[in-house]
Every structure is written in C-alpha cells, then in structure tokens.
Amino acid sequence: MSISTRIEKSLEQAVSRAQVAGSPPRLAAALHYAVFPGGHRIRPQLCLAVARACGDKDPEAASAAAAAIELMHCASLVHDDLPCFDDASIRRGKPSVHVEFGSPLAVLAGDALIVMAFETLTQLATTSPQRMVQLISLVARYVGAPFGIVAGQAWECEERVSLSHYQQAKTGALFVAATSAGALASGADPMQWATLGGKIGEAYQVADDLRDVLCDEAELGKPIGQDATRLRPNAAAQLGIKGAKQHLEELVHGAVNAVPDCPGKDELRAIIEAQTRQFVPKQLATLAA
Amino acid sequence: MSISTRIEKSLEQAVSRAQVAGSPPRLAAALHYAVFPGGHRIRPQLCLAVARACGDKDPEAASAAAAAIELMHCASLVHDDLPCFDDASIRRGKPSVHVEFGSPLAVLAGDALIVMAFETLTQLATTSPQRMVQLISLVARYVGAPFGIVAGQAWECEERVSLSHYQQAKTGALFVAATSAGALASGADPMQWATLGGKIGEAYQVADDLRDVLCDEAELGKPIGQDATRLRPNAAAQLGIKGAKQHLEELVHGAVNAVPDCPGKDELRAIIEAQTRQFVPKQLATLAA
C-alpha cells in the first residue's frame, strides 16, 4: 500500500468514528471538512517515510502516529484561521471551517480533532501498548505547552517574542514529532531523529515565508501577505528573496545530511530532497532558470 | 491526605509543567488562571470518592484521572465562555479567561488544557501502563465526538437538537467519566459505575438550571439567565421551580440508590447525598422551609 493510501485510510478511520448516529451532524460534517481533502500531508508523509526507512516494524503504529500528527495539524489550521487569529477566509482552496460552519463549530471541531488524535493512538492499545504510551507522550509534548504548536501560536500573543522558541514550536514541533514518531513506531531511538525533523521544519518555514511573499492567493489556497499584515517575522523580508532562497537550499542540504543511519537511509535522503524541493514556490524555479 | 488536597496537588503538578523557562509567559499565566482557584471541583471529588469506595488500589492513577477530568472541564469552561459561544465575562467570580487575556489566548489555553489532561495521564506510563491506556481511552470518549462534552456543546449549533443526546453529552459525559475513571483506577469495572455518573450529571444539570433562574450573578460567579437568552432548554422553565426541585430530589435519590456494591458503599452514598445537596441553590432551601 502506498504511503498516501495508508495516510488517507488511517484518517478516514479516525474521522469515521465521529460520523455515527447520535453525533451532532454539523460537527461531524465540520470534522470531515477540516480533514478532507487534505493538503500535501507533508507531516504524515515524513512520519511514514521515516518509519519505512527504519524497517516499518509496526505499520499499524506508524499509520496511527501519522494520522494523529495530521489531525493535530488540521486542528491547528482550523483554530489559527479563526477571526481572533488570522481571520483567514480560505484554506486549502475552499472556505475555511469557521466561514463554512461558523466560529463556534470551528472552535469545537478543533477541540474534537485534538481528542481524536489521541483516540487514534489508543487504537494501538491491544497490539502495541508500550509503543502507544510512548507515542501519546511524544505527540502531546509537540502539541501542547510549553514547547508544542499551541505554545508556538501563543508566542504571537506575547509582547516580547523569543524568535527561536516561536519558530521551533510553531512550525518545527510537528515536524520533529513526525520524524521522532516514525522512528519510534519502528523501534528506533526517537531522540536520534529529532534533529532531522527540526531541520525540515525550518526549511518548511522559510519556504512558507517565500510563498507568503511570492504566490498569489489562488495558488496558495490561503490568503497571502499575512506575515506583513500580522507583523510576523518572515525570512524573505529579512534576507531578501535571493537570500531566503539560498538559506532554504542550505537547510535542505542540512536536512539530507541529518538522516541518521538506518536500513533505508539512501532512499529516505532522496525522498526528503524531493519533498523539500516541492516546498519551493515555482516562481523561484523561474528565478533560478 | 484529604481528597481536596490530592486534587489541588495533582492539578498544580500538571499546570506547573507548562510554567517553565521557554514557555510563552502569557499562555503559562492563562493556564494557571483557568485552573486556579477552582470551583467546587465536583467532578474530581466524585472521581476520588468512587476510587476510595472501591479500595483506592492505585491512588496515583486515581489522582491523575481526577486531575485530567478537571482539566478537561476547565478547558470546556474557557472555550464555552468565548464571545462566539456564551460571551460570558465572569467565571468563578473573576473575569473570564478571554476577558483577562484576550480571545486568542483563551482558545489556545483551552487547547493546551486538553493536551495537558492527556499528558497528566501519561505520567502513569511506568507505574500503571495498562490502567493508563484504559483511562486515556475513557477520558477521550467522554470529551470528544461523537458523545463527549465537545459534542454536547456542538448540539447548541444544530437546528434540530436531540435533547437527550445534548444533555447526556454536555453535562452528563464528564460525570460518567468521573465515576467510571474512579472505579477503573481501583480495578473495578467502569461500566458498572456509568449509571451513577449519568444520574449525578442529570441532577447537576437540573440544579444548574435552577441556579440560572434563581441566583444573582455575584452568588453564581457567572452570568445568570443564560438559558433564556440562548434559548437553551431549562428544567426550571419547563417544570416550574417547584417541579424542578422535586425532579432534582428524585434524581438525587436515584443516584444514591445507583451506587454499585463496593467496600465503601455506605460512605459513598452519604458523600453523594451531601454533595448533591450542595448543588441546590440556597433560595430553594428557604422555599422549602
């Protein structure tokens, strides 16, 4: 089964548990809408690519971890798009959840997705109880406070921002969760895989900064110029477009070199190189040509 | 150690994990503010009372479960008070979290509290791994979709409301979680304890409906008359005050009789009778006198 199929299947299983008789139908619809159709599913792709590179010793655990991480990502998108944050009216090329269902259901859908992510991991209780415990702790650490994506978003509410904590938590955390959880699911040491996730997360952030400056709204599937509007740090604004592009290339190079020894090392390096290349806005390819 | 001390100590431990260097300080402050000082801590009190009645065989598991349930309750209060829901400006007699810290931090504090609740349970990984797995599943079931408190709140966003699903999920779910988790932590069968939680939850809902009609804002610590304003079902409006009071007494009686056989049955029945009596607004005592 392809990695993409595994991801969609795991997500379908998770979301379907809320689509039953007795469930409030609009919440059930909002949950499905928030998860499908997805974006590039970069984080779960990375999680499963790492799990495979480490031998894919527990495919169910890896798929559950990948789905849990993507559900957390979807929850953060739904909440970040709310009027009190980015007030973003489009996401993944369609009306954002609060535009389609209203803010109350958007708040609740985000909450339910967080719980659903943990529930997805509890499905491993009979087959891999010990691994499940570690995965739940790991996912919680990279989502909550003090260092997860929720804390990352909270840095935007501080007067004095610790830039490294902000970026590591807001974007980096779920990438670190993805590589660490993928390794953990295959019995490898998750600590050894954290650096790789951090570097890919940093590269993704720089690419995202470039897209925010270079792309148009239709291509991006969400509002552009948000960083300038929200006075958020942006690598393209700080380093210039060429400078940011060079920084991105260095980060990708660093990520490829950070892949720890594992049975599928070469293949994983190629995957990471190909995937991070997809981060780069096509306008930059033209710029380089 | 008294039940109250155990609860506060467990909650302090949980919240303190977010109060470290590198944590966004206003989020950390909002998390503490959302949890302390607490209300009556009815749900964790109930959880620990049941655990004790069943022999308190794993006090750490019971305390963690009680704290997790209270953290979920606090998360739901923070989100329910938001302008897009109840727009409640006071809670527990002080400005609600979004008034004190702004809506963005209120959304994030709620999210972080949900994650913190699960993290609190993961602390049992080394001492009670199997119990931990069951407690995480149980708490998730009574918080998320389709039947938890998030789903309960979502029923308020539906045009056609299933009243029984609404009330069971919105108020009942965390009471069922409290009795079931308390039993589970002491090695008893959680299923046998669900009915008791459901009955206490129903009694609490009727009492809450009475308070919404009878109390003044200073006494209640939150805005009054919310059900009429929000067109929510209210037992006092439906049955009249005397009718609702009688219904409440029947429910309390039913709850006391629903306590399953256990070593501390008589003591637990007395505790439940005393605690549910506290639900009753003092205006009603005068009415009866």
Image (cartoon, coloured by chain):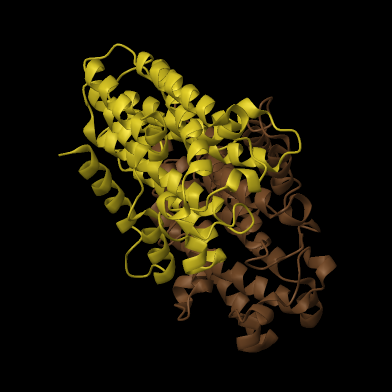
Chain colours: A brown, B yellow
Q: Residue at x 27, y 27 (%)?
A: B271
Which quarter of the rendered picture does the C terminus of chain B lie within?
A: top left
Between residue B229 and residue B196, name the one nearer to us: B229
Q: Is residue B169 left or right of residue A78?
A: left
Please provide percent x and percent y for residue B159: 76, 38
As drawn, the residue found furthest toward the front would be B289
Please provide percent x and percent y for residue A277: 69, 66
Q: Is residue B283 left or right of residue B129?
A: right
As drawn, the residue found furthest toward the top would be B261
Q: Is residue A70 above or below residue B129?
A: below
Between residue A155 and residue B162, name the one nearer to us: B162
Which quarter of the rendered picture does the N terminus of chain B lie within?
A: top left
Please provide percent x and percent y for residue B176: 44, 27
As drawn, the residue found furthest toward the right would be A218
Q: Residue at x 40, y 22 (%)?
A: B252
Please provide percent x and percent y for residue A180: 46, 52
Q: Is residue A100 above or below residue A283?
A: above
Q: Residue at x 52, y 53 (%)?
A: B223
Between residue B254 and residue A212, name the one nearer to us: B254
